[in-house]
Image: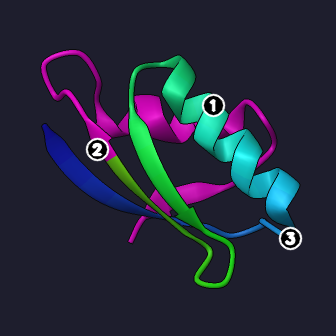
Amino acid sequence: MAKVVLNVKNMSCQHCVMTIKRALEKIGAKAEVSLEEKKAVVEYDESKLKVDDLINAIAKFGYEAEVA
C-alpha cells in the first residue's frame, strides 16, 4: 500500500469530509480526511491506482486536490 497526502482546498464542513472519503473509498482507497487541516491522508494500492486517479475522484465532486 502506498500513502499520499493531498491538500483539499475548498472543504468547508463535515459533509465535505464524508463526500471526499466516500469518493476515495468508491475507487478502492482509504482516507483520513481533516477539515481543520484541509488534508486527506490516502492509502491506496499503487498497482491499481495512481495519484491522478485519487485527485480525479475528488474533483468529480467539485473539490480541488493536489499533492501536499
Q: Which residue corresponds to mark 1? A: 23
Residue 12 visible in the current orientation = yes
In primary-sequence order, the first of circles 2 and 1 is 1
Q: Where is residue 12 in the image (x, y as percent from the top left)?
A: 86, 70
Q: What element carries label 3?
A: loop
Question: Considering only vertical position in the picture, is 9 above or below 16?
Answer: below
Look at label 1 and name its amino acid. Ala
Q: Where is residue 47 in the image (x, y as percent from the top left)?
A: 13, 19
Magenta segment:
43-68
The answer to whether the residue labelled 1 contacts the one labelled 3, judged by CB atoms less than 8 Å apart, is no
Residue 32: give its label: none
In primary-sequence order, the first of circles 3 and 2 is 3
Residue 12: give its label: 3
Q: Where is residue 24 in the image (x, y as percent from the top left)?
A: 52, 33
Q: Where is residue 28 in the image (x, y as percent from the top left)?
A: 40, 21
Asked if residue 66 is among those painted magenta in the image, a careful observer would answer yes
Q: How far apart are marks 1 and 3 (CA)?
A: 16 Å
Left-right relation of 29 to 63: left
Q: Quadrant of residue 35?
A: bottom right
